[in-house]
Image: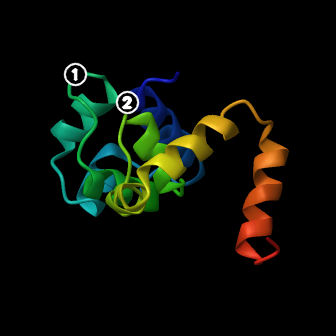
């Protein structure tokens, strides 16, 4: 699995190639309201991934899926935790059943549920 800090740095640098000023370390840190030195330490793996709010802010700035960044940081969003806690056995069973399915099959199930075709 990709290290959280490496992923963040690589993504920021990719975007920086597109717009150097907007994606400098200082500018990104300012947008998510943290110190540039803290973001630098996160990117270099000297600090663990930040909290949920900071990761979600990073996702917004870096044009990433917040759930993906949370997962890379070893976290699950609070809204998903609440949902799982409502029916822990069912969600545990569902996740275990889905773990080996190919992405296209999971996506098909998601569409079926979303569209109410169940």
Q: Which mark is residue 46?
A: 1
Q: Quadrant of the C terminus?
A: bottom right
Question: Residue 52, how many percent across, how many down?
Answer: 29, 52
Q: Residue furthest front?
A: 89
Secondary element at tag 1 = loop
Q: Residue at x 15, y 47 (%)?
A: 35
For residue 99, side relative to residue 35 (left or right): right
Q: Please name the residue that numbered disc 2 is placed on.
A: 5
Name the side, left or right, on which 100 lies relative to 117.
left
Residue ID at (28%, 36%): 49
Colour scheme of the picture:
rainbow
For disc 1, the neighbor class at 10 Å (few under 14, some 14 to 19, many from 20) is few
Task: Estimate the x, y position of residue 50 in percent, counting from the top left.
Answer: 24, 42
Mark 2, other Cα within 10 Å: few <14 / some 14–19 / many ≥20: many
Q: Residue at x 66, y 34 (%)?
A: 99
Q: Are marks 2 and 1 in contact (CB under 8 Å)?
A: yes
Residue 81 picture location, percent across and down: 36, 55
Using the image, tell me which numbered label, if any, was put on residue 93: none
The answer to which of marks 2 and 1 sits earlier in the sequence is: 2
Vertical comparison of 48 with 95: above or below: above
How far apart marks 2 and 1 lie (CA) works out to 9 Å
Q: Position of residue 114 (x, y in %)?
A: 71, 72
């Amino acid at each position: 699995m990709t290290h959280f800090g490496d992923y963040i740095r690589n993504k920021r640098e990719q975007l920086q190639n597109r717009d150097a000023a907007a994606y400098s370390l200082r500018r990104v840190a300012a947008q998510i309201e943290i110190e540039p030195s803290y973001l630098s330490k996160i990117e270099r793996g000297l600090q663990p991934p930040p909290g949920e709010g900071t990761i979600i802010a990073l996702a917004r700035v870096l044009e990433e899926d917040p759930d993906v960044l949370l997962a890379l940081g070893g976290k699950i969003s609070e809204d998903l935790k609440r949902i799982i806690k409502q029916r822990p056995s069912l969600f545990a069973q569902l996740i275990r059943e889905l773990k080996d399915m190919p992405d296209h099959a999971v996506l098909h199930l998601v569409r079926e549920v979303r569209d109410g075709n169940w």
